[in-house]
Image (tube, grey):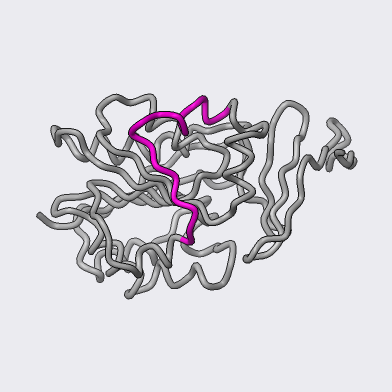
Amino acid sequence: MTTALPDRDGSDAVDTLDRREGPYGEVVLRRRGEHFEIIANGCFLMDTADGRSERLLVQAALDALGATAGPAVLIGGLGVGFSLAHAAAEPRWGRIAVVEREGAVIDWHREGPLAAVSAGALADPRVRVLHTDLLEYLAAEGECYDALCLDIDNGPDWTVTDSNSALYGPRGLARLQQRLRPGGVLAVWSAQPSTAFEEALRTAGFSDVRTQEIPVARGVPDVVHLARRPA
């Protein structure tokens, strides 16, 4: 059963399709007109209105890898599925892992309305879905990747939960670097540029630090922060 709410500007009704209480708080799937939205603890995370920046997150990492054969990528955050779908549509990726801590989000892709957005990517034999918290996954010993593509927050300066801030500090960046193969690429999505995060990446020993902007209809552009583990 869905709950219809008035839209902010009165143009579309907002339907709450599912609402669950998880270990990190409440997570909600809503439909606004023809698009879906994910809300976590009352904070808007993402929607299906425009997936350009989420696709760029993966594409920019792949482009930066150059001629690397069959690279492996870890996507941090399944979200609405744009990044995973884009990765699965690219035959160059040899292995694709996606970490998602919210079981509800995984369910919405496996059996719910977001399955159409991820476009069958979860059935791709290269894809492995890891139901765990990204920080916990990184803290444990494990496999390394050629690219880490992270989209678990609205950016390094705007985290969904307070504990996520550790990911963007010295210890978190060190763990990210340890999970990258030499010459591997880190890509981090953000709703706004962060010069402080760029400096943190350099301080942590990353090279080739740069930021790609993606214009949006209103406000500051979305960005993808890129950096490389030295070879």
The N terminus appears in which quarter of the rendering? top right
Name the quadrant containing residue 142.
bottom left
Residue 141 vs residue 76: left or right? left
The residue positioned 29% from the left and 24% from the top of the image is 91
In front: 153, or 224?
Answer: 153
In front: 135, or 45?
Answer: 135
Q: Position of residue 120 (x, y in %)?
A: 50, 26
> Magenta includes 83?
no
> Magenta includes 119?
yes
Q: Position of residue 84 (x, y in %)?
A: 44, 36
Q: Position of residue 229 (x, y in %)?
A: 19, 57
Please give the count of numbered marks on the rendered protein.
0
- Position of residue 11 relative to residue 224, above or below, is above
Q: Name the residue at the bottom extreme.
A: 171
The C terminus appears in which quarter of the rendering? bottom left
In front: 151, or 138?
Answer: 138
What stretch of residues is rendered in magenta? 117-133
Q: Position of residue 194 (x, y in %)?
A: 43, 60
Residue 150 vs residue 66: left or right? right
In front: 127, or 191?
Answer: 127
The residue positioned 20% from the left and 52% from the top of the image is 208
Name the quadrant containing residue 57.
top left
The residue positioned 67% from the left and 56% from the top of the image is 40
Residue 199 vs residue 161: left or right? left
